């Protein structure tokens, strides 16, 4: 079962330490257990346009 975090703001950090929004739309983050660690998926929050925009493993 995935833990879902809704309304997550994903940002990048510039060289000067300033935050810049990574996406221009609302996102949800799903965290799933994987036998090798965790799987983190960033998903577009819009139910009509819901799509995975980023996925990465955490070991």
Image (spheres, grey):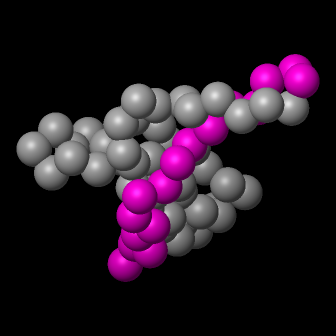
Q: Is residue 54 left or right of residue 12?
A: left
Residue projecting furthest to the bottom: 1
x and y percentages locating residue 39 in the rendered image: 53, 57
Quadrant containing the N terminus is bottom left
- Residue at left 21%, top 47%? 46
> What are the residue bounds of the magenta stretch?
1-16
Q: Is residue 27 visible?
A: yes
> Would residue 17 be counted in the magenta stretch?
no
Q: Position of residue 36 (x, y in %)?
A: 64, 62
Q: Is residue 3 magenta?
A: yes
In the foreground, 38 or 43? 43
| Outermost residue to the top | 15
Residue appearing at x 31%, y 43% in the figure: 44
Displayed quadrant of residue 12 = top right
Q: Position of residue 2 (x, y in %)?
A: 40, 72
**For the view shown, which residue lies furthest in the left direction?**
48
The residue at the point 64 percent across, 29 percent down is 20
Q: Can residue 41 be seen at all in this image of the molecule? A: no
Q: Is residue 13 above or below residue 48?
A: above
Pick the residue in front: 20 or 35: 20
| Residue displayed at 49% across by 55% down | 8
Task: Report how many numbered discs are placed on residues in the image.
Answer: 0
> Is 43 placed above or below 22 here?
below
| Relative side of 30 to 18, left or right | left
**Quadrant in which the C terminus appears:** bottom right
């Amino acid at each position: 079962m995935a833990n879902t975090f809704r309304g997550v703001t994903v940002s990048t950090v510039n060289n000067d330490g300033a935050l810049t929004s990574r996406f221009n739309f609302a996102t949800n983050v799903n965290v799933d257990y994987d036998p090798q660690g965790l799987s983190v998926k960033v998903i577009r929050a819009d139910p009509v346009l819901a799509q995975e925009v980023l996925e990465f493993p955490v070991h």
